[in-house]
Image (cartoon, helix red, strand yellow):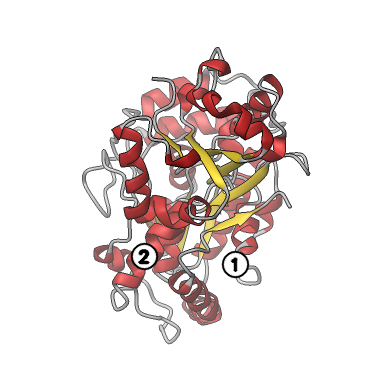
């Protein structure tokens, strides 16, 4: 079936039991209910489509089930909601434009719901809601374990077992690249880093083969021709590294929740390198996407740098979080060039690792209030506040 799950809400019509079950699941599972239910419970009637990859190149829009209610959608009696839950597919915008054009639906009768913190949408077209599923998940779990978060360390003496924490699971290209660069610059041993066989099936040889085949202009990075031989050599050297495990030895399972047993990893270090889901490339990988990786770090009161698309830190500020500018050089967040931005994050990681114990003590004390603010914001955010309408 082309569309995985639908919730037709027009006059409470049920297509079959699968869709009825889906509506009940939205009412009971926090990661789906809290960001989305305010829309499903309002007086406006919605026809909701969960957007998965099989919709990207669908041949005929006229064959999709919501066409049964096309007159109601065209008139505005029903709003067509395209839900990209737990993902940040940028092509949801193209899908929206295609539906509006081919089916003659006014764009303002279509709403896009995405985990992408930025989408390129013309004003006065679609309504666009940034849905933060993962913030909702971690917020709920932190509320359930109020005494389990890492203790405030503002009075720490500045001596830590390691400098930084970097948790990785799937071998998305930017993660083995950065680990290889940490190894190349003698920074790897200064941190707690995980990278080992995962469900994606990649290893160092496959990453090298993939990198070797990347065209010079694939990422429109003017530094790629100079960077490519460097990263290939770093990847080759990294082949000697053993599998690195930290929070779990089963990297086939996504650790998309708050885990108090990992507190010690944060207590042993004074900052994190958050390697977010998206980084390189055009299209879907370019959208800022805040996953559990970011919000678990906030839950543990840990300062961080982000290995992520440009403007990801700006997205955090958009929803009330404070970042660490003044203690961490965050100019990398404005850098559009992926290679340049990675180098900037690496350099800031190196600088932070070089701090003396007295400087680390000042760093921990100085960032403490920011970490406390961020944890309190996430813990106390109302259940109907995990979305933001962006295209006003």
Q: What element carries label 1?
A: loop
Q: Residue at x 31, y 33 (%)?
A: 18
Q: Name the residue under label 2.
A: 140
Of marks 1 and 2, which one's residue comes earlier in the chain?
Answer: 2
Whether residue 5 is visible: yes
Closer-to-camera residue (209/384):
384
Q: What distance separates the C-alpha of mark 1 from that of mark 2?
A: 22 Å
Q: Is mark 2 on a helix, strand or loop?
A: helix
The relative height of residue 164 versus residue 148 in the rendered view (above or below) is: above
Q: Where is residue 356 in the image (x, y as percent from the top left)?
A: 50, 74
Q: Where is residue 381 in the image (x, y as percent from the top left)?
A: 49, 70
Q: Residue at x 56, y 13 (%)?
A: 60
Q: Position of residue 170 (x, y in %)?
A: 37, 38
Closer-to-camera residue (43/159):
43
Q: Assign the N terminus to one quadrant of the image.
A: top left
Left or right: where 379 falls relative to 79: left
Q: Position of residue 190 (x, y in %)?
A: 40, 58
């Amino acid at each position: 079936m082309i569309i995985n799950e639908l919730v037709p809400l027009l006059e409470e019509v049920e297509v079959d039991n699968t869709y009825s079950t889906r509506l009940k699941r939205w009412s009971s599972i926090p990661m789906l209910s809290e960001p989305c239910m305010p829309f499903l419970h309002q007086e406006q009637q919605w026809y909701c489509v969960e957007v998965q990859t099989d919709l990207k190149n669908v041949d005929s829009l006229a064959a999709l089930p919501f066409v049964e209610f096309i007159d109601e959608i065209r008139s505005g009696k029903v709003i067509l909601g395209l839900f990209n839950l737990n993902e940040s597919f940028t092509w949801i915008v193209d899908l929206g434009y295609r539906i509006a054009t081919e089916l003659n639906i006014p764009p303002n009768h279509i709403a896009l719901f995405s985990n992408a913190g930025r989408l390129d949408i013309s004003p006065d077209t679609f309504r666009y809601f940034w849905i933060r599923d993962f913030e909702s998940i971690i917020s709920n779990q932190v509320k359930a374990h109020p005494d389990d978060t890492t203790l405030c360390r503002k009075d720490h003496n500045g001596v830590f077992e390691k400098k930084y924490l970097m948790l990785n699971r799937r071998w998305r290209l930017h993660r083995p690249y950065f680990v290889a660069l940490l190894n190349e610059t003698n920074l790897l041993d200064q941190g707690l880093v995980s990278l080992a066989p995962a469900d994606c099936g990649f290893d160092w040889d496959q990453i090298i083969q993939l990198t070797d085949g990347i065209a010079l202009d694939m990422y429109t990075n003017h530094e790629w021709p100079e960077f490519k031989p460097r990263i290939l050599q770093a990847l080759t050297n990294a082949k000697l590294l053993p599998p690195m495990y930290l929070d779990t030895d089963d990297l086939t399972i996504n650790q998309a929740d708050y885990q108090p047993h990992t507190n010690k990893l944060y207590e042993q270090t004074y900052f994190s390198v958050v390697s977010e889901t998206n980084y390189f490339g055009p299209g879907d990988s370019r959208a800022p996407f805040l996953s559990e990786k970011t919000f678990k770090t906030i839950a543990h009161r840990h300062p961080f740098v982000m290995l992520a698309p440009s403007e990801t830190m700006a997205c955090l500020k958009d929803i009330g979080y404070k970042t660490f500018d003044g203690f961490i050089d965050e100019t990398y967040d404005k850098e559009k060039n992926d290679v340049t931005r990675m180098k900037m994050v690496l350099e800031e990681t190196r600088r932070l690792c070089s701090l003396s114990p007295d400087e680390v003590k000042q760093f921990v004390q100085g960032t403490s209030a920011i970490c406390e603010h961020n944890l309190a914001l996430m813990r106390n955010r109302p259940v109907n506040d995990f979305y933001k309408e962006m295209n006003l």
